[in-house]
Image (cartoon, grey):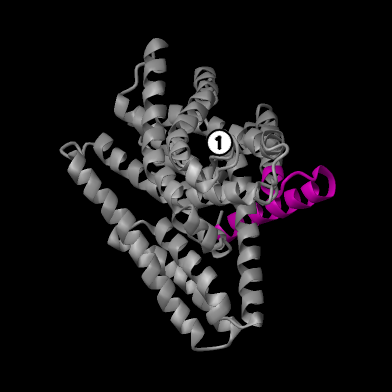
Amino acid sequence: MDLFSVFAIISTLAALFAFVNQRFLKLPFTIGLMIMALAFTILVIVIGNWQPWLMDLSAQFVSALDFKSLLLDIMLSFLLFAGALHVKFAPLRRNIGPILLLATVGVLLSAGLIGGMLYFILQWLNYPVDFIYCLLFGSMLAPTDPIAVLSILKEAGAPKNLEVKIVGESLFNDGVGVVVFLALLSIAAGSGADFNAGEIGILFLEEVGGGLALGFAGGYLAFRLMRSIDHYETEVMLSLALVMGLYSLASALHFSGPLAVVIAGLFIGNKSPAKAWSPNTQLYIDKFWEMLDVFLNAILFVLIGMELLVIQLDGFYILLGLLAIPITLLARYLAVLGPVEYHKERLDFAPKTALLLTWGGIRGGISIALALSLDESMNRDLFLTMAYIVVIFSIIVQGLSLKKVLKITLKGQDSGQ
């Protein structure tokens, strides 16, 4: 099947699921699409028990999509830029301390806690797995997914002072999480066997610092170009070129592409409306990126649902995946508690912020994509199944209940603070 046909099928399914959700289910957009994709996939599996050719064809179709490359190498850059474009810098700057702590120390601590707890549970269950592989699993699930977080928070009605922390952290911590994962993957694969803590730290600073600097430089250049003209078609094209060019250049320089496009999006989105764009240009750029964001989110969440076709449905793996849910939630809570307690007096945090950051820390497609990049020798099937179960729980259960949890937790509080 050629690439156009594959993309046409996925786009058609996404559009049909979106219609049914809007017409009948009326669930939050991305959650509704993923639930329908899961239901569709389960139906295919059930029918496939009587018609094996259907199951084989469907599994080949999903495998041919290369979910990892599609998300990490193509879709992620556009989705991150679209999200960052509409984040206001003023509240982000006021909360930059806890956001940076959560996106760095929080990610590292969460990865270590998840990996450590999983390692001891597997030992207790007489299913020994190397500690480095457990740490790899922790690094997959330590960062919250900005794509899932942004799409769900839009409909959850979170207070502004909480929303900016969740969104700000999620925009930065996925880039940090990917860097941590790649460093651990290099060690696990043997090529990093001689790495010491200093070398890993330098790699981390190079990826993160380089990504931040490249994003600022690219955003500033695009801003200057847009400022010199008033032609919305060209300015939309410049924004597209900025995302693709930055992500490709970051990859070539071994910098963090996600961080580069986030910084560029924040710069363009906050600087250009007042100093570069006419009202007409701003309208078209906002609508273009909003529509692209909705479309790619629809594709992504349908693909997440359909990835069930390539998951190994082993009973023991499923049990471990269910055990991983409380592990990841506990690790997340412990990881965010320190930064929250440290900053809560000065920044007037909402009540029970650590609990809300834990429940609002949605995992998504990035965790699955990282799991798919593991070799078979690294317990890939086990960790992919576990990551998938955690992600499905996170998006559906946490995502659907987030609004209610916010309402209960913040009862009596002014949601606009």
SS type, badge 1: helix
Residue 173 visible in the snapshot: no
Q: Which residue is mark 1?
A: 391
In magenta stretch: residue 12: yes
Where residue 32 sits in the image (x, y, percent)?
72, 43
Taking the image as shown, residue 376 lies to the left or right of residue 391, namely left
Could you say which quadrant of the image residue 50 lies in? top right
Q: Residue at x 62, y 31 (%)?
A: 52
Type of amino acid at the residue the image marks with label 1: Val
Residue positioned most to the right: 24
Looking at this view, is 5 or 18 the one in front?
A: 18
Q: Residue 100, percent across and down? A: 41, 49
- How many numbered marks, from 0 up? 1
Segment tinted magenta in the rendering: 3-32
The residue at the point 42 percent across, 16 percent down is: 121
Dominant secondary structure (helix, strand or loop) of the stretch shown in magenta = helix
| Among the 4 quarters of the image, the one containing residue 248 | bottom left
Rendered location of residue 347, percent (x, y)? 51, 47
Residue 127 appears left or right of 190: right
Residue at position x 47%, y 73% in the image: 241
Q: Position of residue 359 (x, y in %)?
A: 58, 35
Q: Nearer the viewer, residue 89 or 311?
A: 89
- Which residue occupies the extreme left position in the image? 194
Q: Residues within 10 Å of mark 1 (few under 14, many from 20)?
A: many
| Residue at (43% x, 42% y) in the render | 370
Q: Would you say residue 238 sits in the magenta stretch?
A: no
Splitting the image into 4 quarters, where does residue 143 fall?
A: top left
